[in-house]
């Protein structure tokens, strides 16, 4: 294989190292080489957000990110949300508010919502709709997703207080 | 949707980037946010032999004020523009424009320099730069030059950058206090290019007449368009309905969009007029 | 009284029908642990990539594999000639036609499958696909279905030029597929001839695509030693697929296992059998290793399972009071290059004849002519039963047109024409028997909720100021739950469905059904049905679907048939078990069965409530020797349910829009949806389905279209152009309901997921057209994009300030 | 054009060479005097596509001094097709002449789906490029060196519509062997600067 690169980064807190072609896309590295199949491939043109992961505190569409760009980065995927057997407030809220149906967009949605709540801890409905607009869902019509993000925000605020 | 193979380079500083660019010349493409280039590569429309990633070059980031000028590193992202208190205060037009670009994830990666340099007719920053009378710092092997935005955009994806040059900084003269602003953009949905968009900067004299107006249009020709005739017409006028209508008419007269799924030439041209009207009215309401 | 409190507590513990039970499915999805087809990785698995045609109609002069075979990692390149020895170059379609698996000598639509490159991974496969050299000779193209049957029209399907029939009835032109009629033409024409009021409108249901977030794909794994073929695939109907695969491969059905797994949305796109599946199967048989094929988004929108493309003409005849006397609907159907739409054999135009809607129309006639064009094949049911959206769109648009012609209010004209509550069961002019309905209260409740009169007053005021505001009403009747085997079969197989229940000694249950969830929450709702029927907690009831080795035969999940058919099978299978349990209880309590009464989770002796046996106790006993003499051990049952009729959910919707006449932008200010789907199993899931269906209706009405240029070039096949609304564009939904149970369904349920799509689309269009009604506009075709709405404004001369 | 109409039209008679004036076209094989096999490379910004196909001279009308070329091919990835229909007419302008041209570009496959926004601009550039290549050729064949860019192109304003007349600047960059928007426009820009300072290009 031509010009392979050794790339080291942190995936959900654990150091990983992969050998990839320069052209390999992060979504493929995560899914094929690192067995993290939570992030999904929906459109391949960076419109749908199903492949969203968190890289160095940014929500990134991993279908439009080269793995070689991740050298030294901190990558968070949906697989990193459950801590010590405890689900993240967003995971709980998505179930409680029926914010998912086929589940295909859910990992990207939750990962994006996580970063949104880091930046705007108590968002209005309008802010949620605007800042979640990089993630498409074909099933829910978003109404319950908005509810879920708001209720998770409340729970997280209560926990912080 | 897999790119062709290429060599990847991640220079840690500008000199290294420049020497790589000079070494590989035509074979090389600069990688900024990648949300225009990588999709083109995945579709195999673009197949550069070498990708030079500017992402690790710290000196290309940041927003600061120097004298009466705002200086923005070319690798500053859209979200960084949106969140900048300095810009919100000094150049709100840029914040309003950035908010209308693509979607949240793309704005974490997309950069102002990349948007300008890619010079896609649908990109929003070129018109914003014309309205703000910005200038671009271009660094080459032989040194640095400053090119005004006005005249920089020459054709489809064609700018005044010379082979071997990298855009390092965007310089924006801080608009006079009380200057009105607006970026009015009509699009089909989040993440879409504009069917038509107008960027307006507006200064009103004490007497309520127009002291100066800058109007630039997005996606209405192979390049962003500066509506000079409309600007000249407005100077000294009271911005009443008739003046707004005439300015819109003059703006429409320079449009030559391509028809596509967003609309035909007639619609896009008409929308150029409507966006100009909207932008002028909003700018007026914000001017003092 | 405390007694009833205790009963209610026991009832609550069951989490049965009627409660908003949280979904069983979610636990894996919120952890990113769903198992979708692209997540599957088998030892030695290779990856396939499709080479597709850039031309809509062209002869293939030559295909050169050499460069592709030289690409590192490429194992093989398959073309039509490689499939012929195994008789798999062509495959049968669900529409009674054949379709090229890989293009044989010519391509008939753009992006048609031409070659299949098998390589070590998707990168090598992509490089290989690019290296396959195909020499094409372009041929004249037919894009407009109205030109398909012109005398000099180029022949698209030379392979069947001599076939006199494809699917249904005689063909009159090489590009003609079928002509289908229903109703009484002569009688209808007679009524029209002397009717005081008639209206006519040309109404297009444009070509759209269901576009689920997950594209189609499969992993085919053939084991040479065992002769066993396992295919993991994105299929809404695994059992039908297994039958088709067996028919065309010659492998015994018992040697084929189709596994559905988790599916990232279907909406009709994942019902048909696609060339990608078949060529992957062949590739696995040839190479002896598993082959994965995953569609790209561009390929998905360009080639698999489009919907609609019905070019309709609607006509109504009425008296001067707006009472409809006759209906005459026709449609020209563009089926693309192969007749691979999904339809019941006897219903080539699906359920189009439901087009009399919610109205009492004595005389009616409809006709559909289907033709070939140089476009992708398909014609699937996009979140509806086949052709029901087309039918409902026509009638709900036409009754508005009639209202405008007669000057009658759009709500009032519906009141005047509704089938009345006392008329149910009501048989339509086309012979469908509407099982139950109660239309008037539904409409009145909705009008009251939105203050309809107030909205009309506001609209009048706005019109006086030159502003555009539209109020849309839709009072639709759906037809779902295909269906009775006497009317509905695919490839000869009746559209019954099934449920097998196994009760274990400790009272836990496994139930397997022939359907296939794609997000509808079957694992949650089927368990609720069984829980209520058996008095065992739904938490202890495991639902399994989609693995043809485990589940009993069924036609799958599409056309809102899961609850009406498989849900009924589940209830009836449970009742068989309950009957046996009653016998055991009587035996244990030493009373006659007639002395027992059922209470939530137990059989009690009438008049002696302390004497009772719980279902849990009976489960254990049924596995011992202490059961009535001659009775078999165990508590298992299987039910194959052939519904006596379809079910007919209905609803009353109102949509309010504001239109910017200078840009054509439309703002949906309000959308109120009242649905009646009969007995409600899980209100939370029902509401979720309605939100989703309304959002897809919004997408179709306001932006979705699959556009082509005159050369057959696809102009909108990525998510850059194809309209999937985000949270920003999507309106907020208000939902409401009434309950009118189905008399023939064991639990009175009707199915709901498609109503909001079918009923929502005309509601949006009616609102948009209503905004222009005072200017004499009676119809505007979808999608109502700003561009198109502005063109309407321009035609009226109101687009400038 | 730096030569009279008749002379310039004369230059047009070498059809094979003229065919090579089609932007980015390389004639790889001559089938007969009107049919050629060749490749066309298009470069628009970062995008670059190579089409393998045929170039046909569909019309030579000495009376109207009109030549028509048709290029057709499938790109090397096999996912797109393109055709260019280019008409060139020589108009009398005293001791000089004008080359008036129109070009129709149509795309198929992925290029059609993703290129719609830019096709008309591309057609326009092809036309300018053809004119530039042709002018360079006329000059090379002994005409006077062509004069600087005319206002229409020289002002640095965006390019005119797809069917506009397009007098073109002659510059070695402009006469590049591929459709290269950047190179062409940059050459135009340079000519414009030279024009500003009253110098004529070498």
Image (cartoon, coloured by chain):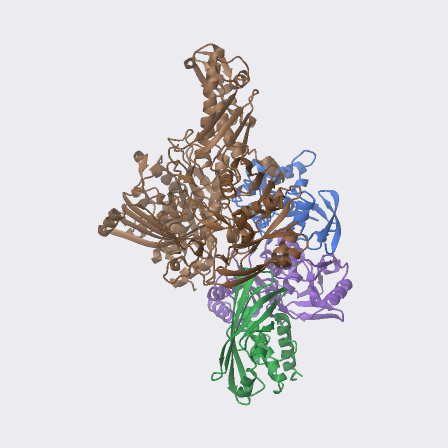
Chain colours: A blue, B purple, C brown, D green
Q: Is residue B273 left or right of residue D20?
A: left
Against C417, residue B149 (above or below) is below
- Of residue D127 and residue A76, the one placed in the foreground of this image is D127
Can residue A85 be seen here? The reply is: yes
Residue lying at the far left of the rendered structure: C194
In the rendered view of the protein, which quadrant contains the C terminus of chain B?
Answer: bottom right
Locate residue C293, reporting x and y percent.
Answer: 59, 47
Q: Residue furthest top?
A: C590
The number of discs equals 0
Tell me the quadrant of the picture where the N terminus of chain B can be found: bottom right
The quadrant where residue A87 appears: top right
Residue C533's place in the image compared with C239, above or below, is above
Image location of residue B7, percent across then percent down:
72, 59
Relative to C670, residue D180 above or below: below
The x, y position of residue C741, in whole percent, is 39, 32
Nearer to me, B204 or C155: C155
Task: Name the one closer to the observer, C153 or B239.
Answer: C153
Residue at the far front: name it.
C85
Q: Where is residue C695 in the image (x, y as percent from the top left)?
A: 48, 46
Dividing the picture into quadrants, the one containing residue C646 is top left
Left or right, C453 with reference to B236: left
Q: Camera-side residue: D177 or C137? A: C137
- Which residue is drawn at the image coordinates 68% and 42% (left, top)? A35
Q: Is residue C123 visible?
A: no
């Amino acid at each position: 294989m031509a010009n392979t690169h050794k790339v080291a980064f942190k995936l959900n807190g654990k150091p990983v190292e992969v050998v990839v072609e320069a052209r390999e896309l992060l979504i493929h590295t995560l899914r094929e080489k690192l067995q993290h199949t939570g992030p999904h491939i929906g459109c391949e043109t960076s419109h749908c957000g199903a492949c969203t992961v968190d890289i160095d505190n940014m929500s990134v569409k991993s279908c439009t990110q080269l793995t070689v760009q991740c050298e030294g980065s901190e990558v968070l995927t949906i697989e990193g949300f459950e801590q010590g057997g405890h689900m993240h407030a967003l995971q709980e809220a998505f179930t409680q508010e029926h914010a998912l149906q086929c589940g295909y967009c859910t990992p990207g949605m939750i990962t994006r919502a996580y970063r949104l709540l880091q930046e705007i801890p108590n968002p209005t409905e309008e802010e949620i709709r605007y800042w979640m607009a990089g993630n498409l869902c074909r099933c829910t019509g978003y109404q319950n997703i908005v509810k879920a993000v708001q209720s998770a925000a409340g729970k997280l605020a209560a926990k912080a207080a | 949707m897999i790119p062709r193979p290429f060599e990847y380079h991640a220079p840690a500083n500008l000199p290294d980037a420049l020497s790589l660019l000079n070494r590989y010349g035509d074979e090389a493409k600069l990688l900024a946010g990648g949300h225009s280039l990588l999709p083109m590569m995945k579709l195999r429309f673009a197949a550069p032999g070498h990708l030079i990633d500017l992402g690790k070059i710290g000196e290309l980031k940041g927003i600061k004020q120097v004298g009466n000028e705002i200086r923005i590193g070319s690798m500053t992202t859209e979200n960084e523009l949106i969140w900048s208190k300095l810009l919100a205060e000094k150049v709100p037009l840029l914040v309003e424009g950035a908010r209308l670009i693509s979607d949240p994830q793309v704005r974490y990666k997309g950069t102002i320099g990349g948007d300008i340099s890619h010079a896609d007719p649908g990109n929003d920053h070129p018109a914003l730069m014309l309205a703000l009378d910005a200038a671009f710092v271009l660094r080459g092997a032989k040194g640095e030059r400053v090119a005004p935005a006005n005249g920089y955009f020459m054709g489809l994806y064609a700018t005044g950058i010379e082979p071997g040059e990298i855009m390092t900084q965007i310089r924006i003269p801080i608009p006079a206090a009380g200057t009105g602003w607006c970026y009015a953009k009509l699009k089909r949905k989040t993440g879409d290019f504009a069917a038509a968009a107008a960027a307006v900067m507006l200064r009103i004299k004490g007497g309520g007449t127009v002291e100066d107006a800058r109007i630039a249009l997005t996606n209405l020709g192979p390049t962003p368009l500066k509506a000079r005739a409309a600007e000249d017409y407005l100077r000294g006028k009271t911005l009443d309905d008739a003046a707004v209508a005439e300015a819109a008419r003059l703006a429409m007269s320079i449009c030559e969009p391509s028809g596509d799924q967003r609309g035909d030439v007639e619609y896009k041209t008409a929308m150029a007029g409507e966006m100009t009207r909207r932008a002028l009215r909003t700018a007026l309401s914000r001017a003092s | 009284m405390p007694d009833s409190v205790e009963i209610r507590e026991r009832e609550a513990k069951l989490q049965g029908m009627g409660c908003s039970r949280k979904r069983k499915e979610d636990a894996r999805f919120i952890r990113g642990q769903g198992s979708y087809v692209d997540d599957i990785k088998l030892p030695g698995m290779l990856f396939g990539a499709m080479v597709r045609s850039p031309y809509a109609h062209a002869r293939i002069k030559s295909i050169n594999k050499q460069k592709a075979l030289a690409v590192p990692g490429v194992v093989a390149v398959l073309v039509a000639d490689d499939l012929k020895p195994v008789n798999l170059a062509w495959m049968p379609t669900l529409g009674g036609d054949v379709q090229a698996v890989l293009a044989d000598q010519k391509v008939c639509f753009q992006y048609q499958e031409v070659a299949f490159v098998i390589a070590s991974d998707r990168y090598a496969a992509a490089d290989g696909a690019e290296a396959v050299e195909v020499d094409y000779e372009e041929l004249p193209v037919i894009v407009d279905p109205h030109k398909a049957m012109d005398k000099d029209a180029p022949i698209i399907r030379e392979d069947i030029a001599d076939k006199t029939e494809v699917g249904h009835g005689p063909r009159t032109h090489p590009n003609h597929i079928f002509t289908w009629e229903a109703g009484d033409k002569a009688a209808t024409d007679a009524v029209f001839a002397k009717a005081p009021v008639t209206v006519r409108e040309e109404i297009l249901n444009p070509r759209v695509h269901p576009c689920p977030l997950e594209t189609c794909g499969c992993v085919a794994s053939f084991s040479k030693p065992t002769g066993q073929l396992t295919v993991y695939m994105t299929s809404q109907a695994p059992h039908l697929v297994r039958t088709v695969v067996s028919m065309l491969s010659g492998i015994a059905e018992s040697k084929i296992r189709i596994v559905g797994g988790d599916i990232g949305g279907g909406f009709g796109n994942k019902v048909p059998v696609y060339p990608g599946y078949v060529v992957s199967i062949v590739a696995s048989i040839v190479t002896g290793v598993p082959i994965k094929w995953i569609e790209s988004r561009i390929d998905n929108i360009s080639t698999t399972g489009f919907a609609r493309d019905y070019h309709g003409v609607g006509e109504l005849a009425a008296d001067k009071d707006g009472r409809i006397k006759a209906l005459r609907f026709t449609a020209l159907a563009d089926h693309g290059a192969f007749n691979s739409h999904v339809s019941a054999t006897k219903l080539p135009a699906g359920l189009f004849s439901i087009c009399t809607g919610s109205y009492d129309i004595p005389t009616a006639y409809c006709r559909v002519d289907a033709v070939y064009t140089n476009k992708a094949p398909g014609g699937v049911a996009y979140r509806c039963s086949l052709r029901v959206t087309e039918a409902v769109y026509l009638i709900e648009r036409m009754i508005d047109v009639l209202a405008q012609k007669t000057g009658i209010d759009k709500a009032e004209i519906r009141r005047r024409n509704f089938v009345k509550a006392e008329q149910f069961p009501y048989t339509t002019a086309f012979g469908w028997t509407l099982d139950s309905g109660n239309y008037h209260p539904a409409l009145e409740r909705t009008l009251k909720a939105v203050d309809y009169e107030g909205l009309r007053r506001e609209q009048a005021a706005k019109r006086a100021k030159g502003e555009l505001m539209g109020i849309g009403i839709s009072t639709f009747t759906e037809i779902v739950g295909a269906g009775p085997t006497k009317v509905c079969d695919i490839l000869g197989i009746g559209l019954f469905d099934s449920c097998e229940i196994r009760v274990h000694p400790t009272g836990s249950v496994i139930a397997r059904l022939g359907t296939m969830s794609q997000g509808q929450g079957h694992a949650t709702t089927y368990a609720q049905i069984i829980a209520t029927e058996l008095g065992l907690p739904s938490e202890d009831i495991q639902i399994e679907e989609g693995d043809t080795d485990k589940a009993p035969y069924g036609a799958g999940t599409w056309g809102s048939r899961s609850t009406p058919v498989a849900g009924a099978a589940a209830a009836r299978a449970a009742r068989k078990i309950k009957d046996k349990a009653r016998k055991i209880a009587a035996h244990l309590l030493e009373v006659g069965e007639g002395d027992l009464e059922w209470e939530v989770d137990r059989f009690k002796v009438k008049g002696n409530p302390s004497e009772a046996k719980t279902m849990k106790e009976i489960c254990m006993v049924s596995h011992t020797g202490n059961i009535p003499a001659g009775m078999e051990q165990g508590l298992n049952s299987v039910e194959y349910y052939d519904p006596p009729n379809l079910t007919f959910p209905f609803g009353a919707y109102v949509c309010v829009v504001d239109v910017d006449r200078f840009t054509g932008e439309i703002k949906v200010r309000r959308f109120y949806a009242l649905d009646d789907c009969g007995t409600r199993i899980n209100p939370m899931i029902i509401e979720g389905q309605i939100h989703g269906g309304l959002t897809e209706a919004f997408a179709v009405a306001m932006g979705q279209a699959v556009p082509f240029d005159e050369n057959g070039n696809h102009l909108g096949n990525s998510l850059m152009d194809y309209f999937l609304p985000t949270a920003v564009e999507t309106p907020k939904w208000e939902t409401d309901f009434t309950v009118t149970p189905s008399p023939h369904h064991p639990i009175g349920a009707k199915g709901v997921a498609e109503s909001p799509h079918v009923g929502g689309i005309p509601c949006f269009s009616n609102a948009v057209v209503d905004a222009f009604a005072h200017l004499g506009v009676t119809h505007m075709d979808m999608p109502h994009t700003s561009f198109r709405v502005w063109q309407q404004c321009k035609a009226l001369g109101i687009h400038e300030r | 054009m730096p030569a009279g109409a008749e002379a310039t039209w004369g230059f047009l008679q070498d059809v094979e060479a003229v065919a090579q004036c089609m932007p980015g076209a390389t004639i790889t094989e001559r089938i007969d005097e009107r049919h050629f096999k060749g490749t066309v490379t298009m470069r628009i910004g970062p995008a670059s596509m190579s089409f393998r196909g045929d170039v046909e001279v569909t019309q030579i009308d000495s009376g109207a001094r009109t030549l028509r070329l048709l290029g057709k091919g499938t790109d090397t990835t096999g996912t797109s097709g393109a055709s260019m229909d280019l008409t060139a007419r020589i108009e009398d302008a005293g001791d000089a002449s004008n080359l008036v041209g129109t070009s129709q570009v149509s795309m198929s496959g992925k290029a059609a789906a993703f290129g719609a926004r830019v096709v008309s601009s591309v057609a326009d550039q092809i036309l300018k490029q053809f004119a530039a290549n042709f002018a360079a050729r006329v000059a090379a064949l002994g005409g006077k060196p062509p004069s600087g860019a005319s206002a229409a192109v020289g002002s640095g304003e965006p390019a005119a519509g797809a069917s506009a007349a397009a007098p073109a600047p002659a510059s070695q960059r402009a006469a590049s062997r591929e459709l290269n928007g950047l190179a062409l426009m940059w050459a135009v820009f340079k000519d414009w600067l030279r024009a500003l300072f009253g110098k004529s290009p070498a």
